[in-house]
Amino acid sequence: MHAPDRPSAPAHPARLILVLSLAPTVGLGIGRFAYSLVLPDMRDALIWSYSAAGFMNTINAAGYLAGALLASRLIRRFGLAATVRWGTLACVVSLALCAISGNFVVLSLARLLAGLGAAAGFVGGGALAATIAQTRPERANFLLSLFYAGPGIGILASGLVAPFVLQAFGPGSWWIVWWAMTLLAAAMTVPLLLAPISTTAGVADAAAAPFAIRPVLIYLAGYFLFGAGYIAYMTFMIAYVRDAGGGAAAQSAFWSLIGLSAFATPWVWRRVLALDRGGLSTTLILGVNAIGAALPIFGHSPLLLGISALVFGVAFFAVVGSTTAFVRLNYPPAAWPTAIAAMTIAFGIGQTLGPIAVGAITDAFGSLSYALNVSAAMLAVGAVATAFQPRLARRS
């Protein structure tokens, strides 16, 4: 018998993973998170409650959950490359739908489609990135971090555009912002369509290996709490900044700081991500994320909000990367798509329940501070939970 073939190393793995990172850039950084920038104007113009505003992210998260559930099947049928590309194109279409109608049902369907496409692109792209990273084991965690910095690019780009479009066109111009986001996302999708990513499929397109939930149940619970906790911060913090008197420049600066922090993630956390000790790396990163989310509780000063954005952002992007590192260190390559999908499902359930719950809390108590308190608490409990996840005996 001979050893199974290892995937051949692409000439420029970092460059190829950066191209792949455009899938979560479009699907998450723009498709999901740009909604927070447009939300205050949409809520005023369309006369929404906080519960209705939260529902829009809940339906997006429900689509993301459905996409995660279907991802492994889509990958087996159409391949990783096609799943990533079509998922990203679906996100572009969803942004255009948000621009053409203020109807609650149409907007809900658009947000649902964005979630479906983002999950397909994220799971497929994550499996491809893990496969490419595996060809350079000494740099694997750093290369994986490049993929998970993708949403930060979308957050930064949308943060530099959306607040100033709203300021220029005035109240009720939320639909113009969605057109701007559509054009931005379409431009970012072009390199993804042209890149030779189909040549990197390798072992990730192999038949799926078994995946047992029980050995990682604690870890999945912690990731669920991350999904439920982070989404309140990312949904309502722009509204919090605006309510505190922050104009377009303050909103743009806050959002851009979150996006910029993603670029530091690969360097800040590369040694932590290399820890092969069960859930320890996720615990450390998620703990920092909780601290960042908790800082606005102590005041509205620009300095405090800026520190909050940086601390939250530099950990936020790394939490997702730590789960893929956990999968890569604990499962054989053939199990990666299924294991990443399982992690994404736990995350998806959390972020489906989170927005509508915190919206209801805000409506009930009349202040966003209560929602942010709950958000930080859930992140802290998630950090504690993942600390109890032991290392698995990996099957090769």
Image (cartoon, helix red, strand yellow):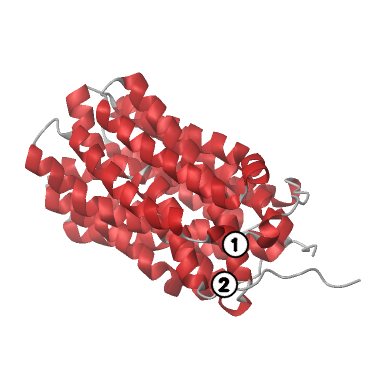
* Residue type, numbered disc 1: Thr
Q: Please say if 315 is above or below 294.
A: below
- Residue at 14% in and 41% down: 166
Would you say 143 lies left or right of 161 here? right
Nearer the observer, 143 or 183: 183
Instruction: Estimate the x, y position of residue 76 in percent, counting from the top left.
Output: 68, 45
Q: Quadrant of the C terminus?
A: bottom right
Is label 2 in contact with label 1 (beta carbons under 8 Å)?
A: yes
Residue 10 marker: 2
Question: Label for residue 199?
Answer: 1
Image quadrant assignment for residue 182: top left
Q: Position of residue 394 (x, y in %)?
A: 77, 63
Residue 115's place in the image compared with 129, above or below, is above
Secondary element at image label 1: helix
Q: Is residue 8 left or right of residue 115?
A: right
Label count reads 2
| Residue at far bottom of view | 138
Q: Is residue 155 visible?
A: yes
